[in-house]
Amino acid sequence: MERRKGVVVRFGSRNMEVVDNETGGRLLCTMPGRFRMQGIRPIVGDRVEYSLSGNGQGRIESILTRETELLRPRISNIEQILLVLSLREPAVQNVITDRFLVLAEYAKLPVVVVINKIDLLADDEIKEFSEIYGEYYNIHQVSSKKEININQLRDILKGKISVMAGMSGVGKSSLLNTLNPGLKLRVSEISRGLERGRHTTSYVELLQFDFGGLIADTPGFANLELPEIEPDSLKRYFPEIDQESGMCAFSDCVHIDEPGCYVKELIKAGNIHESRYESYLSMYNELKEREREKGGKKYG
């Protein structure tokens, strides 16, 4: 029997919805009983092989090797994170942006920082943000309301599996609708074919773009809780700090109060932005406090 390839985009209680790689068509697939007996369960984002059955549905035959995997929400094979923020209405604080970026760095995934609502901003507001983040992150300026730079964002998303993250109110849903008008309505109609039981299941879903590509319609991370990392390893997730750490007098310098700290000299000189260091210091103290509460237990 011919095997086709696709991506799992949604789950019901006993079946799942798969997008075919070649046709882009969507169909319901079931899992063989041996999967359940062996404790094997696909997750959203999994690349699978499936065969067609006589009733127009499919049957999952194998799950291909996962290249990446996010834990919250649990999605595999993510290729990039779209961090959507706004500098007005609401103004997302830098410390919140920094926490998202640490989570993305921890997940080892590329980040595209999308500043939405640029029609509300003055040039100097965008310039100030870009001076802080532009050297290390890809920044894309858009307005979903005015449809500014939307085609360029489509090019970034085309053909990839992405996750959208960001605080409430920054315009994530509006941006999705502008990128692909009617997207949510169409997905809602297709999803009626899934089994009932939505109220008993926590769903993660990938939406399908007409222009090619898939994106999670939930935030990239369930919350902003820092991962369980060693406090002294936090510097690895701030690229402008990490790249200069070798210049400090001590190889294990964590840039708090050690003598001969080159990073702190760069901060004083304005080469590393003070707001980034303040976020680093706040997160470092948070991780140290968590470590103390756990009795000094080291993280893996």
Image (cartoon, grey):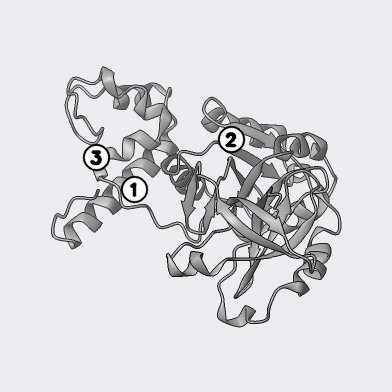
> Are circles 2 and 3 on residues that touch, CB within 8 Å?
no
Q: Is residue 84 visible?
A: no
Toward the viewer: 251 or 266?
A: 251
Which of the two marks, 1 or 3, is nearer to us in this view? 3
Q: Is residue 133 left or right of residue 263?
A: right
Residue 268 occupies quadrant? top left
Which residue is at 54% across, 59% downward?
A: 42
Residue 164 horizontal/vertical position (percent):
62, 51
Which numbered circle lies on residue 282? Answer: 1
Amino acid found under the numbered disc labelled 1: Ser
Which residue is at 19% across, 62% downward?
A: 293
Amino acid found under the numbered disc labelled 2: Phe
Which residue is at 14% across, 54% downward?
A: 296
Which numbered circle lies on residue 129? Answer: 2
Q: Residue furthest front?
A: 1
Q: Secondary structure at mark 2?
A: helix
Q: Which residue is mark 3?
A: 232
Please tell me which of labels 2 and 3 falls first in the chain.
2
Which residue is at 72% across, 39% downward?
A: 159
Residue 147 horizontal/vertical position (percent):
84, 44
